[in-house]
């Protein structure tokens, strides 16, 4: 199992509650981008690459009554969450058009996906996580039929809600230093990281062999409730780190984080994160 799969397996249960809703509006905007593909081919095959808890895959299945959707993810734990969400929200006809597959977007053939079998691939907040983005883009291009379309959105800068993250990191570092405990090492393995601008996204897509490339910059605006901000770090983002700590140290970190959140001004709970989104086509002549 890859380090990335292990990382998301651990966080799968809280992902849909703590993080997916923050990302959802920006992810769902990709459906507008590929709408023309579905208008031209109503029974299109659509891939949600790195489906996570299935936000996009389920929305696409509901939005287009003939489209067949595959949600691909490297984390079996995330797929358990996605399947459960689909089972509880989709009807039988919708479920019959949606499948989930475990595997990496860099090697979709190993997951049993046929080259040139997909009309549109969408991917939200995944391409920053892959170790080699050129390999991932190439994997997606191979899956698309000639003329098929890719649309994705990812971060243009690293990090979660910055002031809140700084409050957590400060609380953790101070508490561990006082307790004489070493800081937990980062999990997940190497990753390509954000794409800093629309022009960088266009360059990466062209280098990966895509045609008809467009990219644009957006801002993800999210006003956090205090409790949601706290849960994001305690129950999701840093839950695995916290679990490694002795109960007394863990309790001290939580108390310090709580106090640090209390000191933050209201404005710190509103997050404006820069994003890059793009669309591109597998050349019809390939
Ligand atoms: C931040 S979540 C985004 C999930 C979903 N697209 C959304 O917008 O809510 C990233 C997801 O990408 C998956 N992932 C990371 N690397 C991957 C890869 N190489 N292939 C497939 N999925 C991957 C993770 O397991 C995780 O479920």
Image (spheres, rainbow, N blue to C red):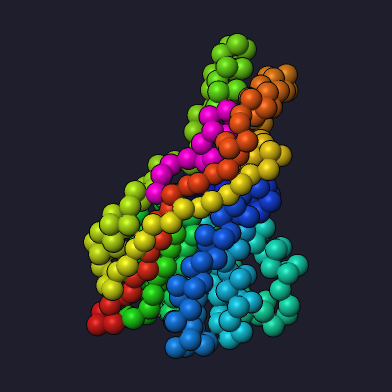
Q: Residue at x 28, y 61 (%)?
A: 202
Front in this rendered view, residue 158 or 182: 158
x 34%, y 63%: residue: 215
Reply yes or no: does residue 165 show up in magenta: yes
Does residue 102 appear left or right of residue 155 in this picture? Answer: right
Residue 205 vs 164, above or below: the answer is: below
Residue at (67, 64) in percent of width and height: 83
Any magenta on residue 67? no
Is residue 244 visible in the rendered structure shown here?
Answer: no
Q: Compared with residue 220, is residue 119 higher up or lower down, i.e. above or below?
A: below
Task: Please identify the quadrant where the C terminus is shown.
Answer: bottom left
Q: Which residues are magenta?
A: 156-168
Q: Position of residue 280 (x, y in %)?
A: 34, 70
In the image, residue 236 sits, relative to residue 177, either above or below, namely below
Q: Position of residue 49 (x, y in %)?
A: 48, 64
In-front residue for pair 274/89: 274
| Image coordinates for residue 231, horizontal then vertical, percent | 68, 40
Q: In which image quadrant can residue 200 be found?
A: bottom left
Please, which residue is most extreme toward the right here?
Answer: 88
Q: Residue 2: image x %, image y %? A: 48, 48
Q: Is residue 130 visible?
A: yes
Q: Residue at x 54, y 40 (%)?
A: 161
Instruction: Answer with left or right where residue 94 lies relative to residue 104.
Output: right
């Amino acid at each position: 199992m890859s380090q990335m799969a292990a990382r998301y397996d651990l966080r799968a249960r809280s992902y849909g509650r703590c993080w997916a809703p923050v990302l959802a509006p920006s992810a769902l905007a990709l459906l507008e981008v590929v709408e023309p593909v579905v208008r031209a081919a109503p029974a299109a095959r659509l891939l949600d690459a790195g489906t996570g808890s299935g936000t996009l895959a389920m929305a696409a299945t509901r939005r287009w009554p003939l489209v067949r959707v595959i949600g691909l993810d490297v984390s079996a734990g995330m797929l358990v969450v996605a399947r459960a969400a689909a089972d509880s929200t989709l009807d039988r006809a919708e479920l019959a058009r949606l499948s989930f597959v475990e595997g990496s977007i860099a090697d979709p053939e190993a997951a049993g996906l046929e080259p040139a079998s997909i009309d549109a691939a969408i991917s939200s907040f995944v391409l920053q996580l892959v170790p080699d983005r050129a390999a991932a883009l190439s994997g997606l291009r191979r899956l698309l039929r000639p003329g098929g379309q890719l649309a994705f959105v990812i971060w243009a800068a690293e990090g979660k809600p910055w002031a809140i993250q700084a409050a957590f990191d400060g609380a953790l570092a101070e508490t561990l230093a006082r307790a004489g405990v070493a800081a937990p090492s980062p999990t997940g393995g190497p990753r390509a990281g954000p794409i800093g601008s629309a022009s960088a996204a266009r360059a990466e897509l062209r280098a990966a062999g895509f045609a008809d490339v467009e990219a644009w910059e957006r801002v993800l605006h999210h006003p956090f409730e205090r409790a949601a901000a706290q849960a994001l770090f305690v129950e999701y983002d840093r839950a695995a780190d916290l679990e490694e700590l002795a109960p007394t140290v863990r309790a001290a970190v939580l108390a310090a984080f709580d106090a640090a959140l209390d000191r933050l001004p209201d404005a710190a709970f509103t997050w404006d994160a820069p994003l890059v989104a793009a669309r591109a086509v597998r050349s019809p002549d390939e």
